[in-house]
Image (tube, rainbow, N blue to C red):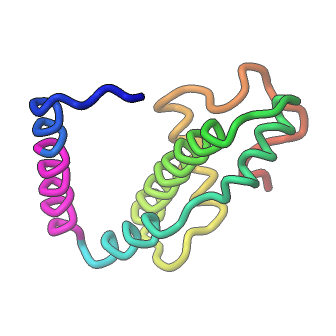
Amino acid sequence: MLPAMADDDYSAQLSFQSQSKDNLKVLMESFTPEQYDRFEASRRHALPKQAVRKLIQQTLGQQVSQPVAQIVAGFSKVFVGEIIERARAVQARRGETGPLSPDHLREAYVIYQHEFGRVGAARPLRSKKLFVR
């Protein structure tokens, strides 16, 4: 049996949710039409949890639970979003338009690595690199 939530806790949670919705509304109102379209596309899409779980299990060599796969999928989605935003900045800096190219993604990944350090395993992976030509 779960303990009942105190009235103060419940009202604080409702207040936080209401404030979060208001903040999201303000943010969305400041988006350009292109940013809004990208935001909606990102919101609608998710990495397939079963595929993520299978990849984790192959990488680690052991079984992982569904919640772990969901967490990794969430972090992966954020990472992909970061790379795409940096690639868009690279594309704008070059004065190019249209869809992103692999060159934009490679340069964005290098920028990300310089900003945050190494991404991925603690030791180099043999013959597995992101965005290889």
On screen, residue 76 above or below 118: below
Compare residues 77 and 104 and report the one nearer the observer: 77
Q: Position of residue 48 (x, y in %)?
A: 67, 59
Compare residues 89 and 79 and report the one nearer the observer: 79
Q: Position of residue 99 (x, y in %)?
A: 54, 76
User: Residue drawn at (40%, 65%), measured in percent from left and top?
Assistant: 92
Q: Position of residue 105 (x, y in %)?
A: 60, 56
* Quadrant of image for the N terminus: top left
Q: Which residues are magenta?
A: 15-31
> For this view, does 32 lie left or right of residue 64?
left
Q: Position of residue 78 (x, y in %)?
A: 49, 47
The main secondary structure of the magenta stretch is helix
Quarter of the image for residue 72 reads: top right
Q: As drawn, which residue projects farthest toward the top?
A: 122
* Quadrant of image for the C terminus: bottom right
User: Residue drawn at (51%, 39%), measured in percent from left and top?
Assistant: 112
State yes or no: residue 28 in magenta.
yes
Compare residues 80 and 49 and report the one nearer the observer: 49
On screen, residue 49 above or below 65: below
On screen, residue 131 above or below 112: below
State yes or no: residue 48 in magenta.
no
